[in-house]
Image: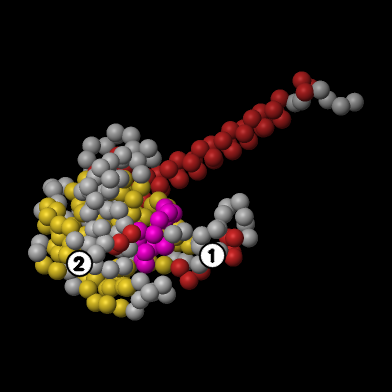
Amino acid sequence: MSESPQDVPAHTKTGALHETVEVTKTVIYALVIALVLRVALFQPFTIPTSSMVPNLLVGDYVIITKYSYGWSRYSIPFGPPLIEGRIFERKPVRGDVIVFKLPRDNKTDYVKRLIGLPGDRIDVHGGVVYINDKAVPRQPIAPDLDGVARFRETLPNGVSYVVNDFGPDGDFDNVGGYIVPEDHYFMMGDNRDNSLDSRAPQAIGVGYVPAVNLEGKAQVVLLSWEEGASVFKPWTWFTKARPQRFIHKVQ
């Protein structure tokens, strides 16, 4: 004769309950650890646009370090007002590639390169960047496969990287008079003629980025996929992969 549910021994019920509690605790611990890691240490981002080409490509899966500049409310998912300003603040370095919250909505994640520090004057003439009335040196290098001109820029602190340039007469190739306010930064995309950045006013672009909006420094491209890859098409995980960019340091 089979036992009815009420006939199950008490110790068996207790054991099942104990096992359920332990599994639940394990899941909660794992979620807490994941949240702490995300808030305090690392966070992944997928690059959605070509504004940072040639250094970051659409489909790159980038890891940022949250601790690089200290923490603000935007270090926490959904940006709750739990932190005033930044705690354990570390100043970013000119040339850093930074993920930040777009100032006009404080929600959208953007990634650009830090060009101007507080107090700097930034101008652009014929596509050449001027910092405090001094031109940022740039050397031409071989064009890409589409014939787009490329230059290696070297900032005053020695940070060097490659930029794309479609010509000296783009919408933001001849602009200037930007004076970076205190506790703000001036950001530019490496794909100079295809980047809506601090050269555009905050109403339509990025404008000056408050220090509190910095989320972290882009450190490494962990993985990368070409356009067309999808989590719902497992074969594209391999056919669309860019293995040459896996574990690729952000320049």
The residue segment tinted magenta is 45-57
Element assignment for label 2: loop
The residue drawn where x is 83% and y is 25% is 3
Q: Secondary structure at mark 1?
A: loop
Viewport quadrant of the C terminus:
bottom left
Q: Position of residue 219 (x, y in %)?
A: 35, 61
Callout 1, which amino acid?
Ala
Marker disc for residue 126: 2
- Placement of 149 over or under 75, stated as above or below: below
* Residue 83 counted in the magenta span: no
Q: Residue 92's x, y, as percent? A: 22, 56
The answer to whether 216 appears left or right of 175 in the picture is right
Residue type, mark 2 in image: Gly
For the residues bearing labels 1 and 2, Cβ distance under 8 angstroms: no
The nearer-to-camera label among 1 and 2 is 2
Label 2 Cα neighbours within 10 Å, binned few <14 / some 14-19 / many ≥20: few
Q: CA distance from mark 1 to mark 2?
A: 37 Å
Please name the residue shown 47% across and 66% down the image: 246
Q: Which mark is residue 241?
A: 1
Front residue of 69 and 128:
128
Does residue 50 appear in the picture of this structure? yes
Tell me the number on the disc at residue 31: none
Q: Is residue 55 part of the magenta span, yes or no? A: yes
Q: Residue at x 24, y 77 (%)?
A: 139
Residue pushed farthest bottom?
Answer: 142
Residue 106 horizontal/vertical position (percent): 31, 40
- The rendered magenta stretch, by its main secondary structure, is classed as loop
Taking 196 as reference, is 160 above or below it?
below
Residue at image location 58% in from the left, 33% down from the top: 21
Which colour assignment does the render follow? secondary structure
